[in-house]
Amino acid sequence: MSNRILIDPHTFARQKERIGGTVSPADLHERTHSPDLADLSATLAYSLQGGTDALQRPFLQLHLHGTLPVYCQRCMQPMDFVVDENVRIVLFADEQALDCAMLADETLEGMVAADETDVYTLLEDQLLMALPFSPKHGEDCQNGRFADALRRPNPFAVLAGLQKTD
Ligand SMILES: [Zn+2]
């Protein structure tokens, strides 16, 4: 857990800096180690780009993408889950400014930036948002009972059939 990349977010944004690399859940804090994850060493690519938006507000654009194996909650076999999180985090000087901006724009992602921000904390927050709640295969699930349920005729169709034979 010694992986830390410290940036000054305001300088990073103002100077339009960019960093990128790969990260796996194993590199990140254990709060991201969901029991649904089948392989903590699977890697994701990330990039962080600084900039200033149309309202002259500094922002960090974070992109996290790749494929994580997760356990299907029906059959407990691993399946691929695609992560593609692209978020713009607008930086604010204090809570009051952040609250005002969030009232004006419900879709805004913002944070009060300290002088030092750990990129790994941003990655952890983003990964937690990306992880599926109770991931499941679709029709290709190996769980027999689920496959049977899909094949079972709709009860109303059965009823319609009975009526026809009357
Ligand atoms: Zn399954």
Image (spheres, grey):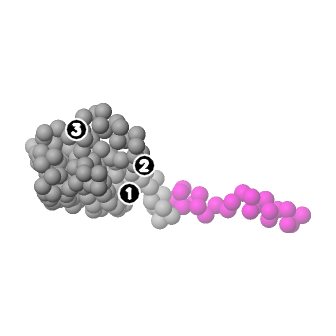
| Left or right for 19, reference 133 | left
Q: Residue at x 16, y 42 (%)?
A: 117
Judging by the rendered image, the residue that carries numbered circle 2 is 134
Is residue 89 found inside the magenta-colored segment of the image? Answer: no
Q: Position of residue 166 (x, y in %)?
A: 89, 64
Question: Is residue 145 in view from this perspective?
Answer: yes
Q: Is the C-beta of the residue carrying label 1 under 8 Å from the nearest atom of ligand 1?
A: yes
Q: Which residue is mark 1?
A: 77
In this rendering, the label closer to the viewer, 3 or 1: 3
- Numbered label attached to residue 36: none
**Which mark lies nearer to you, 1 or 2?**
2
Earlier in the chain: of badge 3 and badge 1, it is: 1
Q: CA distance from mark 3 to mark 1?
A: 46 Å
In contact (CB < 8 Å): disc 3 and disc 1: no
Question: Whole-percent x and y of residue 156?
Answer: 74, 58
Task: Give the amino acid at mark 3.
Answer: Ala
